[in-house]
Amino acid sequence: MSILEVKNLSVSFKQYTAGLKQIQHNVISSLNVNLEAGEILAVVGASGSGKSILAHAILGILPSNASVSGVITFEGEELTQARQQAVRGKQIALVPQSVNFLDPLMRVGSQVRTSVRKGKAVEAQRAVFKRLHLRQEVEHMYPFQLSGGMARRTLLSTAMVSGAKVMIADEPTPGLDPVVMKEALDHFREFANQGCAVMLITHDIDSALQIADKIAVFYAGTIVEIARAEDFIGQGEAIRHPYSKALWRALPQNNFIPIMGSQPHPGALPLGCLFAPRCEMATPECQEDQPEMRNLRDGMVRCIHAT
Ligand SMILES: Nc1ncnc2c1ncn2[C@@H]1O[C@H](COP(=O)(O)OP(=O)(O)OP(=O)(O)O)[C@@H](O)[C@H]1O
Ligand code: SF4
Ligand SMILES: [Mg+2]
């Protein structure tokens, strides 16, 4: 059952050029994705492809120069601005990508305790710190006293104690040592096994594949494929979209084959398929319209030629 549905989401930013001309940058276009209870969906893709913007659109924390269209529902009901505010940090928790989300003026133990919904706050905070290998005295520290890895573990702790039904973790693991990283990933799996839903945004495809049920591949502001984690194997024969295949083959253990060219800038998107300028399978029809997302082999793909 879908706990969170994103339908036809588009996000653009108003920007001014040097000549004070106003232009729209489409950073997310026609994006559809569902989060199922009990599942981990890993979101992977190039830097700047819009992954954090998707997370912030769900939570309702986009900056004021953003225009949003489309519908997001949580437990079958539309997530209006008021509802986003009501569920944020409670039913839907975010592990933000930036450690600047910590309150610089509050001791980190207290910050984590304010997110505890059930049980004793101090005990819950100490238990999660122990699990993430943060010494007890860290609870008395302010964010500026923490290393990058400690700050990231504090952000993770806040989401972990929240008792949320949906967790959106935006690059939660950089800077963590392997032991702590394993604890964090195991926690996401346990969380999903209890019937919650996890969106794990990450550059680390290997770690994602260890725990995720499905993989959503992001390119230039939209999802081009939703696959099962098991599809990422061998030479990528089971993967559907040419970009996902290229991403898979670019990994060090898969021959390190680089992807030629670069992702288009949000202000200069091609007219048809967004991947066409880099795609070896492109034909003239690919340049006509952006392909619709369609079902293919128990997954979804946005490519007219994928089989
Ligand atoms: N406030 C803003 N105003 C204008 N453009 C923005 C703003 N915030 C983000 N963008 C643009 O939106 C696009 C998507 O950014 P986003 O941060 O979502 O990428 P990402 O996929 O999370 O990248 P990374 O993997 O590096 O975290 C980028 O081109 C970025 O420049
Ligand atoms: S639609 Fe065409 S250009 Fe786009 S990914 Fe598929 S084959 Fe390549
Ligand atoms: Mg990001």
Image (tube, grey):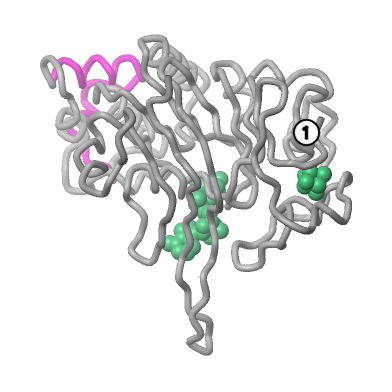
Is residue 274 depicted above or below 180 in this figure? below
Q: On the rendered structure, is 65 left or right of 87?
A: right
Residue 76 lies left or right of residue 183; in this view the side is left
For residue 253, what is the image quadrant? top right
> How many numbered callouts?
1
Where is residue 188 shown, x and y percent of the image? 42, 19
Residue 78 at what x, y percent from top left? 31, 40
Q: Main secondary structure of the magenta part?
A: helix
Residue 16, position as x, y percentages in the image: 48, 79
Q: In the structure shown, which secondary structural element does the residue marked by tag 1 occupy?
A: helix
Q: Is residue 259 visible?
A: no
* Mark 1 CB near ligand 2 (8 Å cut): no
Foreground of the two, 197 or 271: 271
Nearer to the camera, 298 or 199: 298
Residue 181 visible, this orientation? yes
Q: Residue at x 11, y 16 (%)?
A: 120
> Magenta residues, as a range?
122-144
Question: Is 187 on the left-hand or right-hand side of 261?
Answer: left
**Residue 197: image location, x then y, percent:** 40, 22
Side of 9 where 114 appears, left or right: left
Query: The C terminus appears in which quarter of the rendering?
Result: top right
Magenta segment includes 96: no
